[in-house]
Image (cartoon, helix red, strand yellow):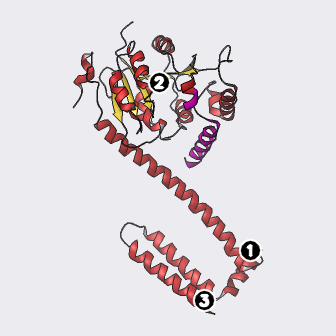
Amino acid sequence: MTDWSEVWLVVPVYNEGQVIEDVVRHARQTFPNIVCVDDGSRDDSAAGIKAGGAHLVQHPVNLGQGAAIQTGIEYARKQPGAEYFVTFDADGQHRVEDVLSMLERLRSEPLDIIVGTRFHGDTAHIPWIKRVVLKTVVMLSRRTRKLGLTDAHNGLRVFNRAVAEQINITLNGMGHASEIVEMIDHHKWRVAEEPVTILYTEYSMAKGQSLINGVNILFDTMLKSKAH
Amino acid sequence: MLIQYILVVFSFAVLLLFLRKRGTTKSAASVKLAFMLFVVFGIYAVLRPGDVTVVAGWLGVGRGTDLLLYALVVVFTFTTLNAYLRFKELELRYARLARAIALRQAEPPVSAGQGPAGAERS
């Protein structure tokens, strides 16, 4: 099983010009199919994506990460032979090895979607403030607890075609992670978690989500469930 | 009182503007009716403020002015929430429009090593 041509990596990109080419190039050594959604970047991200050898889909304006992921999935699911889909971060904090073990599991076990989790074994590599924020988000979400998820805001996810066809992210911003959890529950997708390692580089730390953003996510999620 | 003239003239002006600008088939008839009732009530309240105080008394509110203030707060909250939801919906439509454009102009890699990647380009 060394042929990964039925796998599509979906990478939302926003102002990642510094690293995106290397991230794409590195991932391409394993996965031939990568679609990068340039979410209206103001830097040279698009050039990096092309140079790295990925498919480039460009939002004419900045919409947010949730919207970019949805665009990427819609592009990937139209491609012939696409069976497995991976959401992968552009800043190089995800490891290809983790994706491989998640894919093996998705193929061999009766699952629809596998979500990465940072909370396993020794969590000392996760900055403590992040740990507190992420744990709080999980604690506050009844659904996440019900599904037995420990890290709903992990950007690394692997899922099959059935999920890709049904997925419909409507929260354009950072609230999409909670929305995906909601969809897992609603569509009764069979879900499992896979321990992954996040590479907290200086670059990804500087770009990562702040505490303030956590408040935004909570607010968006709360209002959304009211609006239904 | 002078203020009564000012408010009544203003009310009529608003009504005229509303009926002119949005009197097309677009805005719902119920909205138009509700708005006209609202203006009529407004004019009545301006001309006979005492009556509003009487109504306020029935409801256990001290003065008519207070009743109007409370009503205003409720209406304002409702309008704000409504605007927020409308805005969110609009944002979603906007995202879908941008997505459609983005997907149309997608660029597969030029030096695609694998066959199928470049083949599906329309």
The secondary structure that most of the magenta stretch takes on is helix
Q: Are marks 3 and 1 on the same chain?
A: yes
Closer to viewer: mark 3 or mark 2: 2
Is residue A121 magenta-colored? no
Residue found at the far bottom of this picture:
B1
Magenta region: which residues?
A205-228
Q: Position of residue A169 (x, y in %)?
A: 47, 37
Structural distance between the alpha carbons of marks 3 and 2: 65 Å
Q: Position of residue A188 (x, y in %)?
A: 52, 28
Q: Earlier in the sequence, mark 3 or mark 1?
A: 3
Left or right? Give the position of A94 relative to B59. left
Q: Which residue is mark 1?
A: B59
Residue drawn where x is 44% and y is 20% of the image: A23
Q: Nearer the viewer, residue B45 or A154?
A: A154
Q: Which residue is mark 2?
A: A88
Q: Chain of mark 3?
A: B
Structural distance between the alpha carbons of marks 2 and 1: 59 Å
Which quadrant of the view contains residue A197? top right
